[in-house]
Image (spheres, helix red, strand yellow):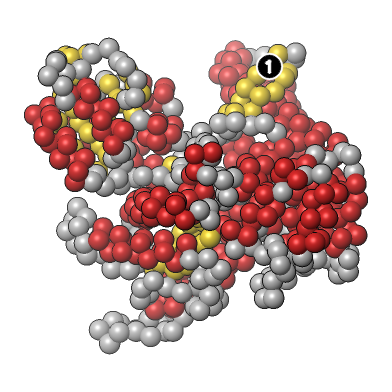
């Protein structure tokens, strides 16, 4: 019987196909469940793949939060799709482990990841007779977009970069958990990649890479087929967040990044007014128009949406002009389609106009300063000789809030590769941001030179001056250079070492075992069907997500899949950086919604 892949129309990717086959295939088709229990993580996981209406169509009539009190339904079996955590297991045991009657007739447990023996034995000792099935499906991550995933662990940022030595055990725990989650990403993609990492300036990437390599080796020794899977033609590259500080604070003018930076979008929900009424729209993967335009420059979006609206209007008028009964019948059938298309276009036109209103009010002039500081050259290609002179107009302006001024100061410091304590104190006092000064100083915990100036030169960048771009969008995220160099096998093996022996098709050596049949074209062999998997410790930006799509499009034979602990916006990142030197009990960890 064919698995119910239709319910995963939100993401036409291997992530969702895997989830459907390994979990819902058994649950919805063979066992005919009506009750589904989810925890916080699996709620997000399932929401990223399907809607409630899709579950209803497959026969699931009740979806419950495992943490909440629920009425018993003792005549029905229940499916528990949960994380292997103490909290979720304890909630399950409250349903089945007590002496009183159980809440449901029987339980089928599907864990997102490897269940520790301690938790498994706890279930076994308390209610083994009630559990009909207990299975690990190895998908402990959120497939956010078709080429983007997140581990949904924003607290990793604090544990990985806080200087407080008392957080060492917490850091070790979260590193282990992240490694397990990354292995499930690789397993979902059916890859055993060569693992490599950025070697400097911190050792987080090195430690995590070693853990992932070890867990990959263990996973492919004990997988369901009981076969040892050799290294595939894919790479997994692990990077610390400090590798590109500029892209985290510069104003980006492509549609998705701009909207999430400038507008109060929460849980991917955009609120707007039309015809005097307040409305909401979700920016999601199954919105074809959103997927089509989200990576385009705002200027292009503002031109394109009105054109699409005119096309639909003219198509509708042409149809209305036909008075035959069959023509009217066709028009009636198309009316819902027309309305849906127009509604989406109105949403995105409102979104684009809201972005432009913010841009015109105080961001436009700021963007020129940011681009000049980020690149070290102006729009004409002339080198910036005095970065402070470029910065001063922003600091003196009353139109910019403290966050924008801090972002500009950071770009100035990044551009000169660190500054003196005296100069930084003067900047902080003049702008009157003493209470927010840790938003600047704490970048040093990410390995970014703040004070004193670094004696090492800044990493070289690709010359992209010949590429067509807008004057206020000249900056290209560093990740694009890394992706292109990785695919073209140009990453320095000293700066980007492997944790294990990698296939000859990636290491560039051309060396082949005597047992192997020599291949004539290693580059083509590597590229055909290979994947480049990226993981950034401490968050990725929307502009970096865009780069994964752009590079995949340019190198069609190698797909880039990019992920992180969570998704960043500049304001949220600055708030998190400010808290790095604070005690753990003073820090609030807010997960991606």
Please name the residue shown 51% across and 71% down the image. Answer: 199
Please name the residue shown 44% across and 84% down the image. Answer: 509
| Residue 587 percent location from the top left of the image | 53, 40
Vertical relation: 564 (above or below) 59: below
Vertical relation: 392 (above or below) 264: below
Q: Is residue 400 left or right of residue 177?
A: right
| Residue 431 percent location from the top left of the image | 83, 46
Q: Is residue 278 left or right of residue 43?
A: right
Vertical relation: 559 (above or below) 395: below
Vertical relation: 525 (above or below) 572: below
Please name the residue shown 46% across and 80% down the image. Answer: 508
Per the image, the residue denoted by label 1 is 278
Along the line of sight, the residue nearer the viewer: 427 or 258: 427
Along the line of sight, the residue nearer the viewer: 526 or 213: 213
Q: Is residue 118 left or right of residue 292?
A: left
Q: Decide if residue 426 is in sight here.
A: yes
Mark 1: which secondary structure?
strand
Residue furthest to the bottom in view is 514
Quarter location, residue 360: top right
Please name the residue shown 45% across and 36% down the image. Answer: 48
Q: In this view, does 94 lie to the left or right of 101?
A: right
| Residue 454 percent location from the top left of the image | 69, 71
Q: In which quarter of the image is the N terminus?
A: top left
Along the line of sight, the residue nearer the viewer: 162 or 413: 162
Quarter location, residue 309: top right
Q: Decide if residue 298 is in sight here.
A: no
| Residue 438 percent location from the top left of the image | 67, 49
How many labels, in total? 1
Q: Residues within 10 Å of mark 1 (few under 14, many from 20)?
A: few
């Amino acid at each position: 019987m064919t698995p119910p892949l239709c319910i995963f129309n939100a993401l036409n990717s291997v992530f969702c196909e895997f989830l459907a086959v390994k979990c819902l295939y058994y649950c919805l088709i063979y066992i005919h469940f009506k009750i589904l229990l989810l925890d916080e993580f699996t709620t997000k996981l399932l929401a990223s793949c399907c809607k409630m209406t899709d579950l209803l169509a497959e026969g699931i009539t009740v979806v419950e939060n495992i943490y909440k009190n629920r009425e018993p339904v003792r005549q029905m079996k229940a499916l528990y799709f949960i994380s292997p955590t103490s909290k979720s297991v304890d909630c399950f045991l409250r349903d089945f482990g007590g002496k009183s009657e159980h809440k449901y007739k029987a339980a089928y447990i599907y864990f997102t990841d490897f269940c520790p023996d301690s938790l498994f034995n706890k279930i076994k000792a308390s209610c083994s007779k009630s559990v009909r099935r207990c299975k690990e499906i190895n998908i402990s991550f959120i497939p956010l977009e078709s080429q983007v995933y997140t581990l949904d662990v924003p607290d990793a940022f604090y544990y990985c970069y806080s200087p407080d030595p008392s957080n060492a055990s917490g850091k070790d725990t979260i590193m282990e958990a992240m490694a397990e989650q990354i292995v499930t990403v690789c397993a979902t993609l059916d890859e055993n990649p060569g693992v490599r990492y950025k070697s400097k300036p911190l050792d987080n990437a090195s430690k995590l890479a070693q853990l992932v390599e070890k867990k990959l080796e263990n996973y492919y020794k004990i997988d369901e087929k009981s076969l040892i899977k050799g290294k595939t033609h894919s790479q997994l590259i692990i990077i610390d967040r400090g590798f590109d500080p500029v892209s985290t604070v510069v104003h980006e003018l492509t549609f998705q990044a701009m909207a999430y930076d400038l507008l109060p979008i929460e849980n991917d929900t955009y609120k707007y007014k039309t015809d005097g009424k307040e409305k909401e729209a979700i920016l999601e993967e199954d919105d074809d128009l959103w997927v089509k335009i989200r990576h385009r420059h705002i200027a292009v979006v503002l031109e394109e949406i009105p054109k699409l609206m005119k096309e639909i209007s003219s198509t509708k008028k042409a149809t209305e002009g036909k008075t035959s009964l069959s023509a009217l019948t066709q028009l009636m059938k198309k009316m819902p389609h027309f309305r849906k298309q127009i509604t989406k276009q109105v949403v995105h036109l409102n979104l684009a106009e809201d972005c432009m209103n913010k841009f015109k009010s105080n961001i436009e002039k700021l963007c020129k300063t940011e681009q000049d500081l980020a690149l070290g050259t102006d729009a004409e290609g002339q080198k910036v000789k005095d970065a402070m002179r470029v910065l001063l107009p922003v600091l003196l302006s009353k139109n910019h809030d403290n966050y924008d001024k801090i972002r500009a100061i950071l770009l100035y410091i990044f551009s000169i590769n660190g500054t003196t304590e005296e100069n930084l104190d003067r900047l902080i006092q003049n702008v009157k941001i003493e209470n927010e000064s840790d938003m600047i100083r704490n970048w040093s915990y990410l390995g970014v030179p703040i004070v004193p100036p670094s004696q090492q030169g800044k990493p070289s960048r690709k010359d992209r001056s010949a590429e067509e771009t807008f004057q206020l969008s000249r900056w290209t995220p560093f990740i694009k250079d890394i992706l292109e160099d990785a695919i073209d096998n140009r990453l320095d093996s000293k700066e980007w070492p492997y944790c294990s022996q990698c296939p000859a098709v990636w290491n560039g050596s051309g060396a082949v075992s005597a047992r192997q049949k020599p291949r004539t074209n290693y580059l083509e062999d590597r590229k055909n069907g290979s994947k480049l998997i990226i993981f950034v410790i401490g968050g990725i930006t929307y502009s970096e997500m865009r780069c994964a799509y752009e590079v995949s499009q340019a190198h069609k034979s190698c797909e880039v899949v990019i992920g992180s602990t969570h998704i960043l916006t500049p304001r949220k990142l600055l708030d998190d950086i400010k808290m790095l030197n604070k005690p753990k009990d003073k820090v609030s960890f807010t997960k991606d919604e």
